[in-house]
Image (spheres, coloured by chain):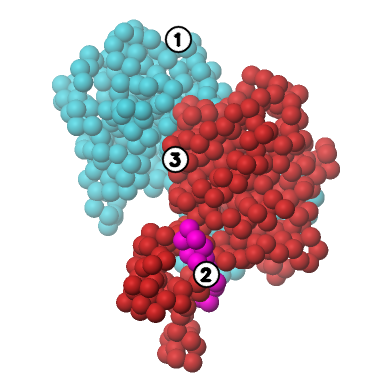
């Protein structure tokens, strides 16, 4: 399969923290609009794109939001204090660059602390190089959200960058939209919002769509680095088919179907039993009268850091598995 | 005075009837319809100009309190908390037990008898009891049953410069504002919803939002305030006397930026003081409302209350008035279809 990773490089660089997904939504809309039949945006900002077909109604969800930092206070000297939007670690944040929607760049640092292990976000601040409150307020307002600013890197095996979570899922969904020509199933691709703060977008999107089947595309953790916590998912071992996480026990038939399709098409795959975390399927499967749901996960190292790493082969295999699944006749 | 009546009424989560009856008696002549739903929420509708969007304004009726879980052989009542209560505030507080509001006191071992370690820590709830003056289990059982609710016995008092001390300002202040809106707004259609069981997990708001299915919702709250002068400004969630607190983010919602900015703009234009609620701790009915059905756009506007979730919370009447002024202007903008 021919895959151009330059779109992924673009996607991870676009601004779109949870609740503030406008820019990334517009970018994705432009990418897909010629390949879908209908596009809709709901009150929570979900982008819902339909490719009509006569079979099962399938909701495919990849969240377009990312974790970030919201400004809650600007002090007299122009330093910004912040709270987390999603899972922001104080330790990962030290000395990182951040960027606001309007392009303002700052760095994160912390007050002197006796015991660094006790560092909290409330002891940290963002320095945008302003010399007074007034100067800072010209560039940033309370309530503004910034994201990590990092570089995209790749080699022949892997990509590493911030925000693979979940722009790699968006990338796979976009590629599937472009590669599926005459869908036999009725496909609703959702680029969901506010996943990072509790699967909020997927919940309202699923209510609106009322699908027969739900599939989320998201990153998962890894267990293949030195002394990593035992977890049977590793890079370059294939698409991960989720069995469970903290938000869902995937429907056995969906899981089985994904496994069978992977076997039949010789797509490398691995089973994922995750003891924490959750993704959009967690919200989808308990919508209305219940929706049989599964997840195709992209094995990713260092999730929620600025150097998330995934294997190019795994990404391609996730895409292959998704396309084969969506193009199969599903009886459930 | 309405806020006095509201705060002195009993309405611990799951037992909101007294507050609900009071609210209904206040609003019934000013709304076009109202109902009590199956969980006990009041869903009232006021007909005015139809703006093509459904607006819902909500305030939760319930307060934090206690519940009797056992009666010991000497007639002392053992209890548990309903909603988030700091156990350190309980000792020696007068309370009212059950439907008949039987007076009692939360008792504990006097300081003279406490062991050194007991003096340095907060007593656990199972070391406390409610004393209603009964001398035996049998005598206590004549007045009290397991499952009875307990409220703090705390009078509404005005003091200082326009300050109010009362229990349950969270969220009778929101109820009071909503009642006043119902009485004074005449030209706009909106749903006024008084919810149950917010303090135990936003229980009432979901079903109420499911029924109303709003496009926009405004949640009225009494929110935490800790404006001590030695704190760094970013650690002060809200200040007394600095106007309504507009929420940015909490555990349950990231508030819609455009709606929030519109509200700020309205406040600025009308010279109404406002502040942002600068903490992401806590949550409120918005969490359920904005994710119900196909979703809605929400804002939370709160009156800052010091010592919230205690028998003696404190708010400023100035903040109450400016919050009401802001709400009125927001509704006026809805009516003019500028939101």
> In the rendering, at what x and y percent does residue B31 appear?
65, 31
> In the rendering, at what x and y percent does residue A93 appear?
52, 53
User: On the image, numbered disc 3 is attached to which residue?
Assistant: B39
Quadrant hosting residue B183: top right
- Residues drawn in magenta: B89-103
Q: Which chain is red?
A: B
> Does residue A323 appear in this view?
no
Question: What residue lies at 25% left-to-right and 35% top-to-bottom?
Answer: A250
Q: Are marks 2 and 1 on the same chain?
A: no
On screen, B118 above or below A8?
below
Circle 2 or circle 3, nearest the eye:
2
Q: Nearer the viewer, residue A3 or B267?
A: B267
Q: Chain of mark 2?
A: B
Instruction: Classify 10 Å Cα crowding around label 3: few (below 14), some (14-19), many (20 and above).
Output: some
Mark 2 or mark 3, which has the lower sequence index? 3
Dot label at residue A284: none
Tell me the distance, in whole angstroms, between the alpha carbons under discs 3 and 1: 42 Å
Tint of chain A: cyan
Question: What residue lies at 22% left-to-right and 17% top-to-bottom?
Answer: A330
Dot label at residue A37: 1
User: On the image, numbered disc 2 is attached to which residue?
Assistant: B103
Q: Are marks 2 and 3 on the same chain?
A: yes
> In the rendering, at what x and y percent does residue A40 appear?
51, 18
């Amino acid at each position: 399969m021919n895959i151009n990773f330059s779109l992924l490089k673009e996607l991870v660089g676009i601004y779109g923290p949870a609740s503030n997904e406008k820019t990334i939504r517009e970018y994705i809309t432009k990418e897909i609009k010629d390949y879908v039949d209908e596009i809709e945006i709901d009150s929570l900002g979900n982008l819902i794109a339909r490719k009509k077909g006569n079979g099962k109604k399938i909701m495919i969800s990849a969240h377009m939001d990312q974790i970030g930092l919201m400004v809650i206070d600007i002090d007299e000297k122009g330093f910004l204090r912040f709270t987390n939007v999603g899972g922001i670690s104080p330790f990962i944040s030290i000395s990182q660059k951040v960027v606001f929607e309007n392009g303002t760049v700052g760095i994160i640092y912390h007050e002197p602390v006796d015991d660094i292990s006790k560092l909290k976000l409330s002891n940290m601040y963002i320095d945008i190089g302003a010399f007074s409150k007034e100067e800072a307020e010209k560039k940033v307002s309370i309530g503004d959200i910034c994201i990590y600013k990092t570089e995209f890197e790749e080699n022949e095996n892997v990509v590493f960058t911030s925000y693979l979570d979940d722009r790699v899922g968006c990338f796979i969904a976009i590629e599937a939209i472009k590669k599926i020509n005459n869908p036999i199933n009725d496909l609703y691709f959702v680029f969901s919002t506010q996943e990072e703060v509790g699967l909020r977008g997927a919940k309202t999107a699923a209510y609106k769509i009322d699908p027969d089947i739900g599939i989320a595309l998201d990153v998962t953790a890894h267990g293949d680095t030195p002394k990593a916590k035992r977890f049977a998912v590793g890079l370059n071992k294939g698409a991960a088919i989720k069995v469970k996480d903290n938000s869902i026990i995937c429907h056995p038939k969906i899981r089985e179907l994904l496994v069978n399709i992977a076997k039949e098409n010789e797509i490398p795959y691995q089973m994922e039993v995750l003891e924490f975390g959750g993704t959009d399927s967690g919200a989808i499967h308990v919508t209305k009268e219940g929706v049989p749901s599964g997840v195709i996960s992209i094995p990713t190292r260092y999730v929620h850091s600025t150097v998330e790493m995934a294997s190019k082969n795994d990404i391609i295999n996730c895409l292959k598995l998704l396309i084969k699944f969506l193009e199969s006749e599903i009886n459930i | 005075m309405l806020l006095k009546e509201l705060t002195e009424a009993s309405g611990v989560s799951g037992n909101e009837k007294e507050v609900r009856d009071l609210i209904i008696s206040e609003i019934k002549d000013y709304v076009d319809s109202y109902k009590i739903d199956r969980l006990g929420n009041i869903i009232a509708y006021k007909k005015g100009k139809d703006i093509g969007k459904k607006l819902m304004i909500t305030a939760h009726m319930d307060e934090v309190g206690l519940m009797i879980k056992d009666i010991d052989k000497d007639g002392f009542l053992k209890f548990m908390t309903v909603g988030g209560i700091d156990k350190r505030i309980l000792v020696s507080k007068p309370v009212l037990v059950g439907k008949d509001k039987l007076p009692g006191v939360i008792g504990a071992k006097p300081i003279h008898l406490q062991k050194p370690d007991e003096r340095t820590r907060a007593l656990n709830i199972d070391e406390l009891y409610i004393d209603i003056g009964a001398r035996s289990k049998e005598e206590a059982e004549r007045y009290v049953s397991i499952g009875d609710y307990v409220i703090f016995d705390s009078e509404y008092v005005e003091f200082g410069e326009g300050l109010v001390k009362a229990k349950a300002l969270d969220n009778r202040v929101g109820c009071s504002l909503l009642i006043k809106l119902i009485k004074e707004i005449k030209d706009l259609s909106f749903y006024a919803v008084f919810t149950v069981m917010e303090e135990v997990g936003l229980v009432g708001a979901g079903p109420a939002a499911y029924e109303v299915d709003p496009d926009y919702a405004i949640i009225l709250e009494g929110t935490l305030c800790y404006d001590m002068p030695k704190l760094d400004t970013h650690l002060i969630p809200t200040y007394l006397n600095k106007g309504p607190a507009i929420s940015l983010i909490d555990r349950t919602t990231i508030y819609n930026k455009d709606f929030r900015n519109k509200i700020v703009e309205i406040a600025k234009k009308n010279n109404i003081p406002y502040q942002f609620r600068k903490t992401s701790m806590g949550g409120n009915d918005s969490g359920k409302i904005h994710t119900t059905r196909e979703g809605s756009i929400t804002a939370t506007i709160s009156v800052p209350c010091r010592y919230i979730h205690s028998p003696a919370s404190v708010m400023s009447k100035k903040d109450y008035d400016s919050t009401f002024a802001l709400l009125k202007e927001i509704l006026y903008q809805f009516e003019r279809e500028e939101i």
